[in-house]
Image (cartoon, rainbow, N blue to C red):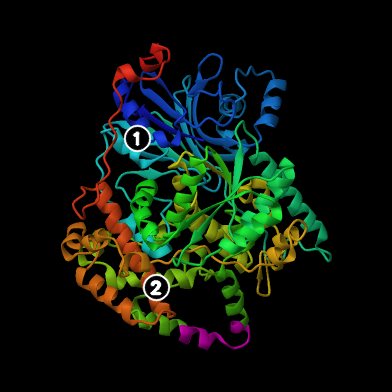
């Protein structure tokens, strides 16, 4: 895993200054503390910070093919690199390293822009075809790794993180209200835009083609499901259990590859425990495990995680956090994610990555993606219950309940209709989107509404798939989960960004291409059966885990929200951020409405829909104010704001041939 940056002259062949390129890589040094390298030629610049995992000595990049007509700068892993490497050798390619980075230039030689369809793994990559003056910027299928780009003064700039773009000195940070609004509608970051004006993100499953100054986004992959009724069903599901087990074994085995030790995350849940169990099987010895304990700050899974680790013989490291420690992690979380994040448990996971790094590890396997593939979230079971009620005459009751919740929020007549991006189908997440989205009607300032204008946040969802209407409703909801919540929340605020802040690479067997395709084809009853989620995965788990672990009910890892920020022991900077002066200065929220809802949270009982909804909304207000303070002036509270790090002097540059920091002839 690495961090990549680059620049392409859209107007000609100007030289991109070496000091600007160096400033960009220094800003993301945490993504690659092991090495730094550059390539520049007229009109183009590439830079890489490397986290060395495969071919530690020979994997320096950017690198090129034999005649230097194709260059690559690569962040990520091609997990099938041994097999790909052998195929390329058979076809007559000369390979100078054992590193998967080098495979890109030769795959491009063979397949051109079809390279992305053949690349399996997790990646953000820049490919430069010097002969044809074509630049390709690509991102993996489900968006595990990030890649951002923007234009300035006739240059196209790109980077693994927004901080690198800002550090170039060519990009002025300005907030994008439509990006902020996405969080308050969908709990996640938009995959159509960022929260910074003019800075765009390459969507999952897409690449950008740049030639002759034209920037053309193109899709190379999208998730697909069978037509309703055509899913895989067997009278005896045992062969399906066998197949899922085999695919997960292969996915784990590929993700154990590398030249450094690998560890695993474990919680009280099923997904990470299965991954750790399969890792132990494939390695033939216990794999070190890391977990989080929450001390009066949310559901505490310490005993369950300890039981699971003991069953697998895994040595366990426990990181324990209370509300104060969660709050103290929040500023670092906003800096890492570069946008507002409502989920305070992400701060706990950030501290977990710090512990992994502190023990000298670089790679951790996690269970992300199982809930998306096999319907593990509570709303999927709620959807099944809602459909049952509707079939048995309960539709009026459902409408009454929904209207009552909306009415309690003070905006009953202004709620958004069903998700039109799914062509009228009401997906499982829709009630949640609607309920929390209603809080905007209370909290947003008039200035915020004016800045949003007639923007419809639903237009930003990447749902242009005409096949959706032919899928089972559960699969329609899973599609929304992959496209909205996985890419925009889980993989940003709980995966790459917070792990790479500590120079730790996350690997996700449930996001393996073969596993995703297999699960997509399954009949819905193998995903949710009655009140049992992830039914097929639980059958696999019974083959390696005690029954009490394999059948353990899911507990969403979620730290308490507003209690960390609005309770009696809140940090001083919270009140500063929520002061009328700071709220007016940022302009997103109505100071009187925020004050009113803060007071109301104390009065309302704990277990009410309104309490939960404004718990999320007010935590998101704190996050937005904090993000604004950190990146746009630093005048909202006493915390220090972010500023681009100053690159070392030229004399302190790492040893390398001088021409690599000069213009290539």
Which residue lies under the disc numbered 1? 27
Q: Residue at x 24, y 47 (%)?
A: 640
Number of numbered callouts drawn = 2
Dividing the picture into quarters, in which one does residue 181 lie? bottom left
Foreground residue among 456 and 549: 549
Left or right: residue 102 compared with residue 459? right
Q: Does the magenta stretch include residue 392?
A: yes
SS for dot 2: helix
In the displayed image of the protein, which residue is found farthest to the left?
Answer: 581
SS for dot 1: helix
Q: Of the numbered discs in the image, which one, if any, rests on residue 563?
A: none
Q: Of the numbered discs in the image, which one, if any, rests on residue 613?
A: 2
Q: Is residue 440 visible?
A: yes
Q: Which residue is drawn at 67% across and 24% down?
A: 88
CA gap between label 1 and label 2 equals: 36 Å
**Above or below: residue 200 compared with residue 311:** above
């Amino acid at each position: 895993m690495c961090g990549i940056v680059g620049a392409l002259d859209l107007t000609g062949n100007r030289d991109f200054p070496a000091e600007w390129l160096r400033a960009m890589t220094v800003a993301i040094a945490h993504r690659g503390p092991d090495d730094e390298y550059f390539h520049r030629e007229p009109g183009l610049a590439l830079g890489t910070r490397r986290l060395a995992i495969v071919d530690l000595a020979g994997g320096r990049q950017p690198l090129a093919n034999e005649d230097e007509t194709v260059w690559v700068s690569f962040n990520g892993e091609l997990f099938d690199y041994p097999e790909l490497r052998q195929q390329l050798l058979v076809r007559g390619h000369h390979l100078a390293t054992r590193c998967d980075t080098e495979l890109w230039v030769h795959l491009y030689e063979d397949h051109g822009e079809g390279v992305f369809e053949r690349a399996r793994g997790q990646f953000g990559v820049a490919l430069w075809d010097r002969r044809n003056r074509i630049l390709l910027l690509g991102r993996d299928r489900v968006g595990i790794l990030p890649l951002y780009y923007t234009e300035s003064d006739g240059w196209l700039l790109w980077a693994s993180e927004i901080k690198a773009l800002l550090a170039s000195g060519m990009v002025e940070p300005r907030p994008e209200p439509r990006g902020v609004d996405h969080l308050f509608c969908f709990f996640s970051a938009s995959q159509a835009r960022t929260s910074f004006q003019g800075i765009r993100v390459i969507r999952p499953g897409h690449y950008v083609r740049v030639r002759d100054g034209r920037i053309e986004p193109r899709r190379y992959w999208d998730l697909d499901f069978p037509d309703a009724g055509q899913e895989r069903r067997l009278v005896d599901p045992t062969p399906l259990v066998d197949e899922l087990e085999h695919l997960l074994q292969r996915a784990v085995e590929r993700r154990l590859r590398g030249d450094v030790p690998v560890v695993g995350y474990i919680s009280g849940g099923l997904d990470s425990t299965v991954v750790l169990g399969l890792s132990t099987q494939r390695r033939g010895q216990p794999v070190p495990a890391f977990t989080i304990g929450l001390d009066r700050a949310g559901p505490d899974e310490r005993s369950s995680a300890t039981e699971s680790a003991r069953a697998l013989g895994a040595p366990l490291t426990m990181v324990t956090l209370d509300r104060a420690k969660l709050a103290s992690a929040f500023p670092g979380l906003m800096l890492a994610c570069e946008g507002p994040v409502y989920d305070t448990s992400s701060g706990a996971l950030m501290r977990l990555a710090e512990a992994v790094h502190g023990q000298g590890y670089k790679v951790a396997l996690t269970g992300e993606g199982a809930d998306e593939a096999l319907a593990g979230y509570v709303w999927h079971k709620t959807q099944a219950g809602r459909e049952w009620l509707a079939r048995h005459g309960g539709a009026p009751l459902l409408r009454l309940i929904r209207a009552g919740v909306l009415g309690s929020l003070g905006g009953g007549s202004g709620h958004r209709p069903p998700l039109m991006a799914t062509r009228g189908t009401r997906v499982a997440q829709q009630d949640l989107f609607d309920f929390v989205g209603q809080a905007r009607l209370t909290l947003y300032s008039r200035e915020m509404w004016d800045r949003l204008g007639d923007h419809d946040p639903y237009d930003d969802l990447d749902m242009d798939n005409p096949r959706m209407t032919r899928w089972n409703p559960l699969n329609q909801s899973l599609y929304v989960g992959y496209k909205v919540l996985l890419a925009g929340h889980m993989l940003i605020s709980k995966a790459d960004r917070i792990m790479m802040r500590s120079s730790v690479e996350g690997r996700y067997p449930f996001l393996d291409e073969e596993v995703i395709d297999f699960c997509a084809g399954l009949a819905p009853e193998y995903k949710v059966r009655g009140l049992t989620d992830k039914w097929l995965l639980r059958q696999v788990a019974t083959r390696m885990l005690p029954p009490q672990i394999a059948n353990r009910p899911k507990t969403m890892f979620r730290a308490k929200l507003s209690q960390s920020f609005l309770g009696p022991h809140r940090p001083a900077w919270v009140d500063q951020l929520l002061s009328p002066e700071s709220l007016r200065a940022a302009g997103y929220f109505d100071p009187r409405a925020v004050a009113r809802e803060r007071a109301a949270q104390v009065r309302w009982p704990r277990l009410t829909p309104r309490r939960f909804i404004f718990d999320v909304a007010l935590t998101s207000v704190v996050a937005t104010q904090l993000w604004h303070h950190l990146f746009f002036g630093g005048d909202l509270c006493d915390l220090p704001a972010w500023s681009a790090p100053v690159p070392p002097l030229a004399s302190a540059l790492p040893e390398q041939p001088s021409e690599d920091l000069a213009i290539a002839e």
